[in-house]
Image (cartoon, rainbow, N blue to C red):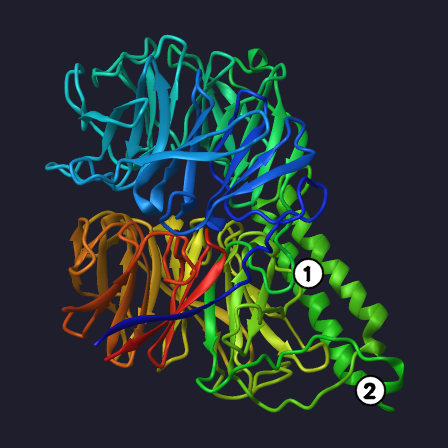
């Protein structure tokens, strides 16, 4: 009994061999994180999920070198994360988080890179998750994100500049009460050598000296900044404290006294900031956007709560939209037949000589009319979150895409060929959120995914297949399941159907909207279909509840009920992220920030719960359980921080697990797994940071 890794969907990068290469050519990055600038003003980038380092000229116009491969050798990485240039020596430090070590690489003017040593994985040190790294007066400080001390704390590990271990800091002292470290990520220094820690587990930025004594900010008389939206990194640039994600989709700007000055706007999910040699300039990595950007902003202008939009001077990284590529894959539905080896999906347009002599115009007109109705529904649902000057930019963008595709159909319908609907519902559907589309495959080949829908609204996330018991009015291919897609940003849920003429997924109806009223949704994530009633259950994460909807025989969607509220009691949730429903009607819910699984009946009555907060891959400890599925009498749970897929029986007893943190595609390792799907003991787990769907098999 156990889980074995089989393969993955989603193509990897193409090797770059002809160097130097112009960066305006197609350069595909995969969740880049760290950057630094060496003594020759060259820019180094950790292309993290590709397990390689890229080196560019100062202007970011030419790629000069590609270094590294997947593995654990001296020239190999498993998720190179943060980079630091030694201030005096021609050295670059690389935190190799998946291999639990740090590299020292030497370089010269001709960019001859030589490994010096690796350190931190010695038994007496045993780094668990080396992340951020800083240097001051002969000492290195490494944030050990996944270290677990006696009290469950993470730590800072201190080394000399040759990588010899000196001591650790697990608790920040000197304040009226100890300040614990939990999942520290980015680090930075000011000119006085004070350490700033992005203490991600508590969403704070902590300041201390090299002995671990807390250094209070004058504004709040505490050794930490709090009330942050997120704290994954921190950088001291132009004398200011910059916190990427400290404000949603922005960089919060503080003075070194701890006073909030304002924000830098126009970002999605930035992580590392690196000061750049040119005036008022800095590098920004946007891992989810697969991009490295050079920005310019005078931070003296950010004060008194002002927001500033930096100037983008340069940007690297394509759209990750090549055939077979994924860009932030979040959810999966369907199944690939066991004996299927090649894809049979086809969205190609035929030549005029192959067109049929008769095209059923009624089917075309019916489809176009549905799209017009869908567009009107969408606009109406968006009105509650519209602004007086119009809809938010990302919503306008989504509407524009919808209309562009509609116009394309109207213009080119005669060039599409009608194929007979064979009623084959085999096939896998993937939410490719970064490319605003659904992709599909009927093959286990990594490059077999193909676009299969009109553009989705930005923020599309959850997915479930709904097989109607009887044909619905306006349903064009009743034998093929409807697909239900949740949108995290807008609170809107769209039900798609397959159009046999367009050979694409098109909207059937929409429901929900942004808000907290019973019929509204806030940051919806996972979706489940009740196998008995066919009702749609949605993890309404932002409202801390489960929302139940029903699509009736007339094709009209309506709210049935909601249950749950914020809290940690038996009837409470704290960010429920996913739901699965067993054949007997038990609803299993990942109560994410309560680190447990809640079990309710389909009417929302509490039955039991299991699990508790803690590390572990072979028990019922959970840290941010994100996704859950039911299949063949077993419960499958994706445990995010533990990077484990855990299997439980119907008595909530642990059975087995698969685990592995890293970016090695040959081993099925995980970084940021999202909404899992299990069908006939085959486990499909999309990883939105690795940009692939891992496929496993469970043997009971």
Relative to 56, residue 452 above or below? below
Q: Residue at x 64, y 64 (%)?
A: 323
Q: Is residue 661 visible?
A: yes
Q: Which residue is mark 1?
A: 376
Q: Is residue 323 placed above or below 134 in the rendered structure?
A: below
Q: Which residue is mark 2?
A: 359
Foreground pick, 311 / 129: 129
- Expressed as whole percent of the image width and height from the top left, the position of residue 274 reads 51, 25
Q: Is residue 352 left or right of residue 140?
A: right
Q: In the rendered view, does 460 fall on the left or right side of 537?
A: right
Label 1 neighbourhood size at 10 Å, few (<14), some (14-19), many (20+)?
A: few
Foreground residue among 667 and 606:
667
Which quadrant holds residue 556?
Answer: bottom right
Question: Could you say which is closer to the camera, residue 313 or residue 628?
Answer: 313
Dot 2 alpha-carbon crowd within 10 angstroms: few under 14, some 14 to 19, many 20 or more: some
The image position of residue 4, as x and y in percent, is: 31, 71
What element does badge 2 sit on?
loop
Q: Residue 199: x, y in percent? A: 31, 30
Q: Residue furthest left?
A: 150
Asked if 61 appears above or below 665 in the picture, the reply is above
Is 81 above or below relative to 187? below
Q: Residue at x 47, y 84 (%)?
A: 337
Calculate the distance from the C-alpha at mark 2 to the C-alpha at mark 1. Answer: 27 Å
> Which of labels 2 and 1 is toward the front?
2
Mark seen at residue 467:
none
Q: Residue at x 78, y 78 (%)?
A: 365
Q: Locate residue 187: give its quadrant.
A: top left
Any part of residue 230 in sight: no
Is 271 on the left or on the right of 350, as rendered?
left
**Do residues under tags 2 and 1 come within 8 Å of each other at their CB atoms?**
no
Q: Quadrant of the N terminus?
A: bottom left
- Taking depth in this image into account, of 383 and 253 the one nearest to the observer is 253
């Amino acid at each position: 009994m156990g889980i074995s890794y089989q393969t993955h969907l989603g193509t990897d990068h193409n090797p770059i061999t002809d160097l130097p290469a112009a960066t305006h050519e197609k350069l595909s990055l995969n969740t880049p994180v760290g950057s630094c600038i060496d003594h020759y003003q060259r820019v180094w980038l950790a292309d993290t999920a590709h397990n390689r380092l890229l080196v560019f000229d100062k202007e970011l116009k030419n790629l000069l070198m590609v270094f590294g491969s997947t593995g654990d050798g001296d020239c190999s990485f498993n998720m190179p994360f943060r980079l630091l240039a030694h201030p005096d020596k021609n050295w670059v430090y690389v935190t190799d988080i998946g291999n639990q070590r740090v590299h020292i690489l030497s370089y010269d003017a001709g960019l001859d890179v030589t490994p010096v040593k690796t350190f931190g994985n010695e038994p007496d040190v045993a780094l668990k998750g080396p992340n951020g790294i800083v240097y001051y007066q002969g000492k290195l400080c490494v944030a050990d994100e996944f270290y677990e001390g006696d009290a469950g704390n993470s730590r800072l590990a201190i080394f000399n500049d040759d990588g010899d271990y000196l001591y650790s800091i697990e608790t920040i002292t000197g304040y009226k009460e100890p300040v614990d470290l939990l999942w520290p990520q980015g680090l930075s220094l000011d000119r006085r050598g004070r350490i700033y820690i992005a203490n991600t587990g508590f969403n704070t930025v902590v300041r201390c000296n090299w002995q671990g004594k807390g250094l209070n900010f004058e504004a709040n008389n505490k050794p930490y900044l709090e009330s942050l939206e997120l704290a994954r990194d921190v950088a001291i640039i132009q004398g200011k404290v910059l916190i990427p994600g400290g404000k949603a989709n922005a960089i919060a700007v503080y003075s070194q006294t701890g006073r909030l000055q304002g924000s830098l706007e126009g970002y999605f999910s930035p992580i590392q900031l690196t000061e750049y040699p040119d005036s008022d300039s800095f590098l920004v990595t946007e891992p989810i956007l697969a991009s490295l950007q050079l920005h310019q902003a005078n931070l003296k202008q950010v004060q008194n709560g002002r927001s500033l939009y930096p100037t983008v001077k340069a940007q690297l990284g394509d759209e990750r939209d090549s055939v077979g590529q994924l860009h932030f894959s979040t959810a999966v539905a369907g199944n690939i037949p066991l004996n299927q080896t090649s894809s049979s999906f086809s969205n190609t347009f035929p030549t005029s000589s192959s067109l049929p002599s008769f095209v059923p115009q009624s089917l075309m007109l019916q489809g176009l009319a549905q799209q017009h109705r869908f567009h009107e529904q969408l606009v109406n649902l968006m009105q509650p979150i519209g602004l007086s000057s119009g809809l938010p930019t990302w919503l306008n963008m989504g509407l524009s895409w919808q209309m562009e595709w509609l116009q394309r159909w109207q213009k080119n319908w005669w060039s599409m060929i009608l194929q007979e609907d064979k009623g084959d519902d085999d096939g896998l559907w993937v939410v490719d959120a970064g490319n605003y589309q659904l992709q599909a495959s009927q093959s286990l080949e990594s490059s077999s995914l193909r676009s299969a829908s009109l553009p989705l609204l930005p923020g599309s996330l959850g997915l479930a297949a709904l097989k109607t018991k009887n044909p619905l009015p306006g349903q064009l291919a009743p034998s093929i399941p409807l697909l239900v897609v949740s949108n995290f940003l807008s609170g809107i849920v769209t039900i798609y159907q397959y159009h046999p003429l367009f050979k694409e997924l098109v909207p059937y109806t929409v429901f929900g909207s942004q808000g907290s009223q019973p019929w509204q949704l806030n940051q919806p994530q996972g979706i489940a279909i009740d196998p008995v009633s066919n009702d749609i259950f949605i993890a309404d994460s932002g409202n801390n509840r489960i929302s139940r909807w029903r699509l009736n025989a007339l094709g009209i969607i309506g709210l049935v009920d909601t249950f749950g509220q914020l809290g940690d009691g038996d009837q409470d949730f704290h960010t429920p992220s996913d739901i699965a429903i067993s054949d007997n009607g038990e609803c299993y819910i990942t109560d994410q920030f309560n680190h447990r699984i809640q079990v309710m009946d389909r009417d929302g009555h509490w039955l039991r719960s299991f699990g508790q907060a803690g590390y572990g891959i072979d028990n019922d400890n959970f840290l941010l359980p994100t996704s859950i599925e039911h299949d063949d009498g077993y419960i499958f749970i994706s445990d995010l921080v533990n990077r484990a897929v855990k299997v439980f029986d119907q008595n909530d007893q642990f059975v087995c697990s698969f685990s592995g943190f890293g970016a090695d595609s040959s081993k099925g390792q995980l970084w940021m797994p999202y909404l899992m799907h299990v069908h006939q003991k085959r486990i499909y787990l999309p990883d939105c940071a690795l940009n692939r769907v891992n496929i496993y098999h469970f043997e009971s």
